[in-house]
Image (cartoon, grey):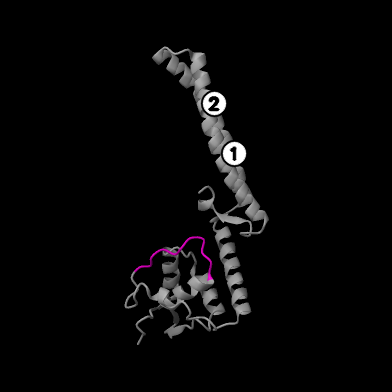
């Protein structure tokens, strides 16, 4: 009979729940992770399948895997309270030597990164950098084309001098684009410096590129 803070489920279901909560991992990667940490996360046979304690798994990954975004709130987990993982901060301390734990963690992270790259979930920093600079150039070109037509339209509609309207619109666009250009380039340069320093193994999540 399962303990109050245990919930034994299949590895497939565990991988699906983790992914839903923001910790993206597929069944094969999770199976490798469980083998690497078999001392802390023993499996329980159930016919031809193996079950894993999901509560213990959540607590273990929160201590051993660095996620780029916090894991979202998990769905209700049967008899186990939703806060159970937070109540077990030191459950796995001492189960492995520090050196072995760090090695296993590094290997798991590299495998996850390789898998994400194959799925197209990661983008090389240089590609994000070039894409951002290209977008800025396209925006500047679009503003320049729009100024000509808008100046002519304003001249006809309001009786303004077309040349003066064009100069005013160019000044407005130039100032706005300058601020935008400066801010975006600063962020792209920061990403590139971090990549060159090895801060994140030359990859960043695409979704975080321009946040």
The answer to whether 67 appears left or right of 85 in the picture is: right
Is 56 located above or below residue 194 in the figure? below
Against 156, residue 26 (above or below) is: below
**Residue closer to the observer: 190 or 138:** 190
Return the disc, 2 or 1, that comes first in the chain's sequence.
Answer: 1
Residue 189's spot in the image, x, y percent?
A: 62, 47
Res. 118 mark: none
**Label 2 residue SS:** helix
Furthest-right residue in this view: 196
Q: Nearer the viewer, residue 4 or 160?
A: 160
Circle 1 residues within 10 Å: few <14, some 14–19, many ≥20: few
Q: Which residue is mark 2?
A: 144
The quarter of the image holding the N terminus is bottom left
Q: Is residue 81 visible?
A: yes
Q: CA distance from mark 2 to mark 1?
A: 16 Å
Spot occupied by residue 39 in the image (x, y as percentages of width and height):
53, 84
Residue plotted at (47% across, 81% down): 91
Q: Secondary structure at mark 1?
A: helix
**Quadrant hosting residue 13:** bottom left
Name the spot of residue 136 as percent of width and height, x first: 56, 37
Corner quadrant of residue 177: top right
User: Pointer 1: what residue?
Assistant: 134
Q: Is residue 73 magenta?
A: yes
Q: Which residues are magenta?
A: 65-75
């Amino acid at each position: 009979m399962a303990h109050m803070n245990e919930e034994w489920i299949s590895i497939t279901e565990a991988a699906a729940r983790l992914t839903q909560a923001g910790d993206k991992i597929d069944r094969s990667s999770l199976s490798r992770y469980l083998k690497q940490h078999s001392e802390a996360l023993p499996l329980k046979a159930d016919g031809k399948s193996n079950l894993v304690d999901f509560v213990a798994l959540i607590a273990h990954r929160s201590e051993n895997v660095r996620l780029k975004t916090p894991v979202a709130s998990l769905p209700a987990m049967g008899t186990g309270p939703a806060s159970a993982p937070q109540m077990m901060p030191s459950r796995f301390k001492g189960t492995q030597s520090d050196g072995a734990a760090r090695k296993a963690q590094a290997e798991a992270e590299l495998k996850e990164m390789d898998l994400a790259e194959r799925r197209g979930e990661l983008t090389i920093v240089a590609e994000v950098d070039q894409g951002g600079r290209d977008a800025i150039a396209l925006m500047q070109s679009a503003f320049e084309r729009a100024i000509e037509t808008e100046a002519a339209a304003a001249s006809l509609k309001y009786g303004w001098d077309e040349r003066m309207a064009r100069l005013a619109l160019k000044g407005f666009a130039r100032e706005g684009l300058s601020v935008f250009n400066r801010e975006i380039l600063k962020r792209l340069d920061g990403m590139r410096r971090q990549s060159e320093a090895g801060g994140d193994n030359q990859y960043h999540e695409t979704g975080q590129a321009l946040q």
